[in-house]
Amino acid sequence: MAAATGDPGLFKLQFAPFSSALDVGFWHELTQKKLNEYRLDETPKDIKGYYYNGDSAGLPARLTLEFSAFDMSAPTPAHCCPAVGTLYNTNTLEAFKAADKKLLLEQAANEIWESIKSGAALENPVLLNKFLLLTFSDLKKYHFYYWFCFPALCLPESIPLIQGPVGLDQRFSPKQIQDLEHAYDDLCQAEGVPALPYFLIKYDENTMLVSLLKHYSDFFQDQRTKVRETLELSFYYLVKKI
């Protein structure tokens, strides 16, 4: 997350796009799948990747696919968040080039939007981080062609921020930060996941609580006036912690 500051008095919410990182193990597994399972089958396949938000400043936000991408039940690496996607593996280079990428992108974006409208994204926020991978594998020459896409919903207007992003140490005391870390880690452990990309926070001087998105209504029932600030802080913590 970043703030654009063309106008010193106006901050606009911005998002850093993902960069694809396809491990050599992914291509090896795709080759095996193509030879032994997919063969001439071009129907879409579910795959999964993961991303990590703890790299040094200045490095791109990478979404990684490795050998385990074809196993939807494979564990996600420690401190990483899962992302689900769709693989379109073509049989020829011509089919790869002729694929209607705009249509594929629109279909994926519609799936994200429908998951938001239906409430499915609240139950399973992983649905918000979908990706597309279009591939062609020339197994005779060991040449691999691919097109990676990260669908994103476009809002009709930019989102103004009340103030620019700040670090946790500028907003919270050392004890509050420690309490937040413990609350987040406890929630991850309770959910049986290595990390949570989206979550809710509410706090006062003595208490720091976190919860899942699906508990939004009940979680903020006693502090409706602080929802905006609370959601902002969940974003700051996401950038700092994961």
Image (cartoon, rainbow, N blue to C red):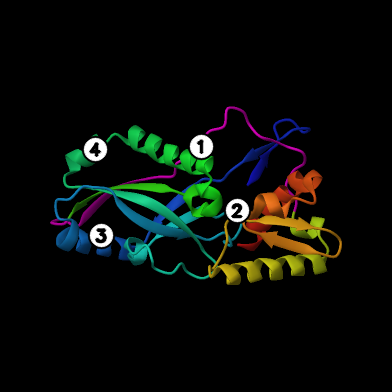
Q: Which mark is residue 153?
A: 1
Amino acid type of the residue tagged 1 in the rendering: Leu
Q: Closer to us: mark 2 or mark 1?
A: 2
Discs 4/2, front: 2
Q: In percent of the image, x 16 and y 44: which residue is there?
A: 92
Secondary structure state at the residue bearing disc 2: helix
Magenta-drawn stretch, dominant element (helix, strand or loop): loop
Residue at disc 1, secondary structure: loop
Q: Position of residue 100 (x, y in %)?
A: 29, 34
Q: CA distance from mark 3 to mark 1?
A: 29 Å
- Kindly report the distance in space between the C-alpha atoms of the residues bearing marks 3 and 4: 19 Å
Please give the residue where the numbered disc 3 appears in the rendered image.
30
Residue assigned mark 4: 97
Question: Does residue 60 appear anywhere in the picture?
Answer: no
Q: CA–CA distance between discs 4 and 1?
A: 25 Å
Query: How many other residues sit within 10 Å of disc 3, few (<14), some (14-19) or many (≥20)?
Result: many
Residue range of the region highlighted in magenta in the rendering: 139-166
Q: Nearer the viewer, residue 235 or 97?
A: 235
Identify the element where label 3 is drawn. helix
Please, what is the three-letter code of the amino acid marked with disc 4?
Lys
Mark closer to the chain start, 2 or 3: 3
Q: Position of residue 191 (x, y in %)?
A: 56, 67
Give the Cα distance between marks 4 and 2. Answer: 41 Å
Residue 10, located in which quarter of the rendered image? top right
